[in-house]
Amino acid sequence: MKPKILLRIAAVLMLLHSMGHTMGALNWKTPPNAAVGQVISGMETTHFEFMGRQASLALFFDGYGAITLLVLLLMIALLWLLSNQTENPLTARLLTLLTLFLLLMAVAEYLYFFPLAAVLTFLAGICGLAASMRIRKN
């Protein structure tokens, strides 16, 4: 398979991941049961001073979700843009870094979040690795 196709597949996989992440980020305050509802309530209502401002764990959770969405969107854009640069030797080097990032991200997602997110990221990383190897071969 051509590197361009592999990178676009990786971008689509990360798009699916970002869509799932966005749905989760928008709905995390909807508790599936009363016990989780109490935890969410505590996260929202317990405020503390942190680095000169009032914060809560819910605020941090929302912020981490927003930052992660931005990282996912950046990854999609990079993969798509690099798919148009497969003749450039620098692309293979950049893809190696992106692939390493994706594979490490997949491990973290598997350990701390959801297997589906980890699988999508892992497959995107494998596609990026395969594209990088094919670009280097040419």
Image: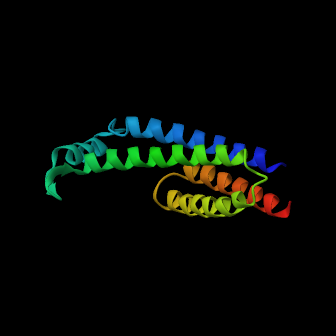
Q: Quadrant of the C terminus?
A: bottom right
Q: How many marks?
A: 0
List x then y, in percent, for residue 89: 75, 60
Q: Is residue 63 left or right of residue 102?
A: left
Identify the colour scheme used.
rainbow
Identify the image quadrant of residue 94: bottom right
List x then y, in percent, for residue 119: 62, 52
Give the vertical position of 19 relative to 135 (above or below): above
Q: Is residue 72 left or right of residue 46?
A: right
In this rendered view, identify the residue nearer to me: 62 or 76: 76
List x then y, in percent, for residue 121: 60, 52
Give the vertical position of 8 relative to 134 (above or below): above
In this rendered view, identify the residue nearer to me: 45 or 92: 92
Q: Is residue 66 left or right of residue 53?
A: right
Q: Residue at 51% x, 51% y: name it.
A: 114
List x then y, in percent, for residue 103: 61, 61
Q: Is residue 26 left or right of residue 7?
A: left
Q: Residue at 59% x, 39% y: name it.
A: 16
In this rendered view, identify the residue nearer to me: 83 or 68: 83
Q: Residue at 60% x, 48% y: name it.
A: 78
